[in-house]
Image (cartoon, rainbow, N blue to C red):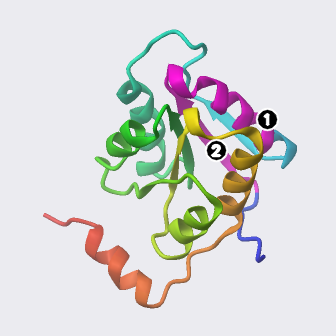
Amino acid sequence: MKNDTPVNLIIPIASDHAGFEAKELVKQILKEQDITTIDYGTNSDDSVDYPDFAKLVAQAVNNGDHEMGILICGSGQGMCMTANKFPKVRAALVWNEELAKLSRQHNKANVLCLPGRFLGKDELRTIVTSWLQTGFEGGRHQKRIDKIIFKK
């Protein structure tokens, strides 16, 4: 597998209460790979509103402060829907390794959204590692990416 993980990568990460446990696991997985994280919360499994946390990571990626981000909630759906409101964000809901790779190869996803209630540590490790190490194929896929960037 070609390793396309950017050098000196810093990943902003956030979750809601349902994704808190998975977020802590993902932070450990990234630390083991010498990848720095910036944790935008939440900091417990106390109930919170996922859009508040999704916006923080999506804004950091949208502004170009960070190349990639990770969001985790119970299903991954709410985080993904919120993140994709930002024009430069291409958030992908991923629950297996193949989708992780395809979201990068074909869609140039820059925010990984994970369903924290449905993935264990080994699955999270495989998905996160594959997503980070898979590059964009370009070519025919670039014209499609250009079409999803809305211009006024």
Residue drawn 48% across the image and 76% down it: 106
Q: Residues within 10 Å of mark 2 (few under 14, many from 20)?
A: many
Q: Which quadrant holds the C terminus?
A: bottom left
Q: Position of residue 131 (x, y in %)?
A: 64, 60
The numbered mark, 2 or 1, whose residue comes first in the sequence reads: 2
Q: Which mark is residue 28?
A: 1
The magenta stretch is: 8-30
On screen, residue 34 versus residue 46, left or right, reads right
Residue drawn 57% across the image and 14% down it: 45
Residue drawn 56% across the image and 32% down it: 117
Residue sitting at the far top? 46
Q: Whole-Å distance between the Cαs marked 2 and 1? A: 12 Å
Q: Which quadrant holds the N terminus?
A: bottom right
Residue sitting at the far left? 152
Check if residue 96 falls in the magenta segment: no
The rendered magenta stretch, by its main secondary structure, is classed as helix
Quarter of the view holding residue 129: bottom right
